[in-house]
Image (cartoon, rainbow, N blue to C red):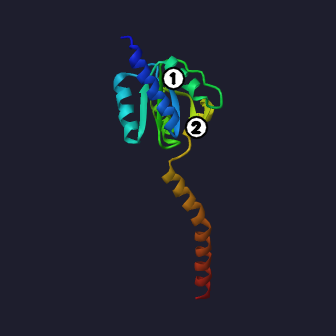
Amino acid sequence: MAKTKQQKVEILEKIKDAIANAASVVFVNFHGLGVSEANNMRNALKEEGIRYFVSKKTLIRRALEDAKLPGDIPVLDGELAIAWGDDSIAPARGINTFATKYEGKLSILGGIFERRLIGKEEMLAIASIPPLKTLYGQFVNIINSPIQGFVMALGQIAEQKS
């Protein structure tokens, strides 16, 4: 069913708001994704604080042109949706998780990161960054490793002296 002009204006405003206020935005091609798969993905993304919205390419392109962000608008092929959130990395990571789960049915086309348009490769690199808690754990492990070695050496010295 065709959208009325008023509906298109409302959708355009929603997209502009997402582009202006989100920490990052991911452009998603969801060609071949079934309804149940899409609903499962939407629910999982919503739990992580990621919003997902399907729109016409022309409306997204118009919102991007109006935003005047640095960088080139990526090629927006197939059925198009946007995912965005307050976390800089979560939208890309969330979509990438489902892209691997539903291989061939869902893919990242590019996005907006740090108020700059970026391509598919850069957005995929951002999607591969682990969650913050995992990074904290890795950091603690790196700090703990030399200390642990020092404690083991002291323990062996104490053992030899006794």
Query: Residue at 39% across / 18% down in the picture?
Result: 6
Q: Residue furthest right?
A: 71
Camera-side residue of 28 and 143:
28
Residue 126, horizontal then vertical, whole percent: 58, 39
Which amino acid type is marked by label 1? Ile
Check disc 2 and report its element: helix, strand or loop: strand
Kind of residue at disc 2: Phe
The answer to whether any part of residue 99 appears in the image is no
Q: Pick whichever, 19 or 109, lies toward us.
A: 19
Q: Residue 35 carries which label?
A: none
Which image quadrant: the N terminus? top left
Residue 3 percent coordinates (x, y): 39, 14
Q: Nearer the viewer, mark 2 or mark 1?
A: 1
**Residue 80, horizontal then vertical, whole percent:** 48, 22
Q: Name the disc covering residue 113, or none.
A: 2
Residue at point 34%, 26% (across, down): 36
